[in-house]
Image: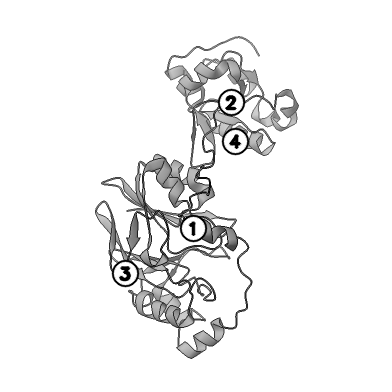
Amino acid sequence: MIFRQLFDPASSTYTYLLGDPASGEALLIDPVYEHVPRDLALLQELGLRLKATLDTHVHADHVTGAWRLRQRCGSAIALAEAVGAADVNRPLRHGERVAFGQRHLAVRATPGHTSGCLTYVLDDESMAFTGDSLLIRGCGRTDFQGGSPQQLFASVREQILTLPDACLLYPAHDYRGITVTSVAEERRFNPRLGGDVDLGDFAGYMNNLNLPHPKLMAIAVPANLRCGKPENAAPLEETPDWAPLTLRFSGVWEIEPMALLEHAATLQIVDVREAPEFIDRLGHLPDAKLVPLSQLVDRLGELDRERPVVAVCRSGVRSAQASVLLTKAGFGRVANLAGGMLRWKAEGLPVASGSV
């Protein structure tokens, strides 16, 4: 099985990708709206087709990417039936299964943090995705969205900590950067729910947390009850319109050689190789401006910030770094030539061989 753990630093949210390599089908758990382009890039690079998105609950600190992903790739939206959210393709109940290729996730209702919390357990019980019901050495709060200390105590003790000791537990959040725990660890060391803690201990603790509400709660909860669909139904602009580009999982936009050839007249082409390479056997693109990567930061003033920039090097590695530097320097329209001059030459496209 293909498994990836992704992170949103703004809300400390983990998104999980599970893929079946034989069929190419995949699921995303707790996608974040702003990171949909990143998630789509990863799916493309891994050769996976998104079958469904699954949210563990109605989040109060970020907006789900479920609707946006469905708009892009037709994936189904799955969420607890108890939530009553609009636009859900598959309302989930306790005991159901969500399949992806030859694998599946079992759905366990674990209310308490909110009334609509679900935990997703992999078919062989080697891993489970607990949302906010059980965090690493902690748990989600129980003071809004129908939360209940009594329900959460029962949910965790009966539906999560009854899994095999070695089962790895992946939460929806961790604010310290810890990525995973296990049933055995949480059963023994969780200060709220493990060891000899009883319901009275737990309820007394949770009822006296006195936490402020999440800053984005007034925005996130209504949006997530629409599965992330904007009120005006207009998605964020995802792809630049100045040329056909592809976003890589590295975060760099790339342009294919033929697309660059077709749009070259409207672009600034910056070759970031060293001077001897500019006139070697590979040659260089017609009208390319030589600005070696080692000099790029000091020579930004030579570039027009109003025109898109395409960075070029031998293989696409140095120019990818140049793209990052240009973007950080405030250039808003930047792309990297996919495969660099090696790919350009291999496709038989025109080159110049003159001096610098």
The kind of secondary structure element at disc 3 is loop
**Residue 278 or residue 184, whichever sits in front:** 184
* Left/right of residue 145 with respect to residue 305 in the rendered view: left
**Residue 196 or residue 29, whichever sits in front:** 29
For residue 174, above or below residue 237: below
Q: Tell me which numbered mark, 3 or 2, is placed earlier along the sequence.
A: 3
Mark 4 vs mark 1: give the one in front.
1
Residue under pointer 4: 321
Q: Is residue 198 visible?
A: no
**Residue 205 or residue 345, whichever sits in front:** 205
Q: Counting other residues with Cα less than 10 Å from the Cα at mark 3, is it few (<14), some (14-19), or many (20 or more)?
A: some
Amino acid marked by disc 1: Asn
Residue under pointer 2: 310
Residue under pointer 1: 224
Amino acid marked by disc 2: Val
Q: Tell me which numbered mark, 2 or 1, is placed earlier along the sequence.
A: 1
Residue under pointer 3: 94
Label for residue 202? none
Marks 3 and 2, how far apart at CA: 51 Å
Tell me if label 4 and label 2 are in contact, CB under 8 Å: no
Q: Residue drawn 46% across and 23% down? A: 343
Tell me if label 2 and label 1 are in contact, CB under 8 Å: no
Mark 2 vs mark 1: give the one in front.
1
Q: Tell me which numbered mark, 4 or 1, is placed earlier along the sequence.
A: 1
